[in-house]
Amino acid sequence: MVVKKGNGIQLKGELNVPGDKSISHRSIIFGSLANGTTRVRGLLESQDCLNTVNAFQLMGVNIQKEHDKDTYLIEGVGVNGLKEPKKLINCGNSGTTMRLLTGLLASLDFYSVLYGDESLSNRPMKRVIEPLQEMGANIWCRNKQLAPISIKGKVLKGINYSLPVASAQVKSALLLAGLNVEEEIKIIQPKQSRNHTEIMLKKFGVNLVDDVNTISLPGGKKNLHAQNIVIPGDISSASFFIAAALLIPNSEIKIKNVGINDTRSGIIDVINKMGGTIEFDHIRNAEYEKVADLTIKYQNLKSTVIEGDLIPRLIDELPIVALIASQAEGTTIIRNAAELRVKESDRIKTIVQELGKLGADIEELPDGMVISGPCNLKGGVNVSSHGDHRIAMTLRIANLISSEDVVIDDLECIKTSFPEFNQILSSIIQY
Ligand code: S3P
């Protein structure tokens, strides 16, 4: 059967994607730890970020949305002003909430317990617990590596630590612990991972030295000063619409106000390597984070190799990149991406399995995948998101280019990062 990509639809128009998830978490955390009132515009109101809001509210921080406005007010209590939570802290599905809070709470003088949903309860926590224990932290967990995590905070020592994996969450956990430590924290990363914590700590007035792969936070108690923050649109959320516009004939969309921080923009480099072009205009620096409007048109793409330093710069986009690769001419190889196995699902297994069901030519590697294209996606089957928001959104886009409808078992999980996804997608589809 001959398949018409897009099934006669096209994507047209201008859109905004909601605020960046990583930057939203950090705004809540640093706003709570600052002295004074931080105003945050464009905070992502997804379940993951609301879990971080709830955590700080449980620790006595007043966080409220301004009536009828797109702004959150956070009345910061200072680094040592948080109160012992009387309840367990529910991190839900959010690895960022759990890992960053583990670091922070390890250095604060009270008892706390962090727990999460089934996916989060199976994700590796040793990567944060081990270096924190080296700093002297009192942390207990299941099987020495899994949540729930209980913490009895105390005065910690400094650390000189080479990260075994390029993880922004681990790096950030150690920097948060370091806000309350008398000695230096020095972190060496194997590859550059997203640097929003470093950028935001400097914005809040912390003296941090950030030299690509080495980050040093001097010893001594830190004072953070309240800020006004405007959060750029999330490039990870934008990537689903970028893919759809590239793959559906006659499409042309403009996504406004997207964060294009170099540590996050690997997907743009990959599209360029595949022979595609994304136009940037109105490039500007909002809150030290680079932002632009992106115009994306339907294009024929060719295969590429995605590996090495590129991987941490597009780790969350690899499921949708796999779909793009299935429509490109030739064989695309993704490697050095074993971290995908410990995300909200084992994303190597889940994406290979589910795109495979639709008819994609895709194979699993221990640390990546091999995808050959272009391939007609037949659809007409039931697929599973495995409760993983990014797999669910990838399958929704796959449905648009499949010849027959695809039934996805659970779309609720999309609320984790992008509650407005379906509504925005519907607004740019033309029949
Ligand atoms: C994040 C870091 C990344 C990313 C996650 C968000 C963050 O995880 O996959 O979605 O906000 O710091 P790792 O630090 O595990 O690579």
Image: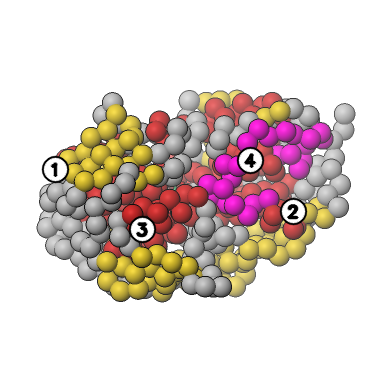
In front here: 157 or 50?
Answer: 50
Is residue 184 in sight in this rendering? Answer: no
Is residue 281 in sight in this rendering? Answer: yes
Amino acid of disc 3 = Gln
Amino acid of disc 1 = Gly
The residue that label 1 is drawn on is 136
The residue that label 4 is drawn on is 411
CB atoms of marks 3 and 4 within 8 Å: no
Q: Between disc 3 and disc 2, whose residue precedes?
A: 3
Amino acid of disc 2 = Ser
The residue depicted at 31 percent of the width and 49 percent of the height is 101
Q: Between disc 4 and disc 1, whose residue precedes?
A: 1
Q: Residues within 10 Å of mark 4 (few under 14, many from 20)?
A: some
Asked whether mark 3 and ligand 1 are closer than 8 Å, the reply comes as no
In front here: 401 or 84?
Answer: 84
Give the CA distance from mark 2 to mark 1. Answer: 51 Å
The residue that label 2 is drawn on is 426
Left or right, 392 with reference to 417: right
In front here: 17 or 243?
Answer: 17
Give the CA distance from mark 4 to mark 2. Answer: 15 Å
The residue depicted at 83 percent of the width and 49 percent of the height is 9
* Mark in front: 3 vs 4: 3
Q: Residues within 10 Å of mark 2 (few under 14, many from 20)?
A: few
**Quadrant that contains the N terminus:** top right
Left or right, 78 with reference to 385: left
| Residue 196 painted magenta | no
The residue depicted at 63 percent of the width and 36 percent of the height is 410
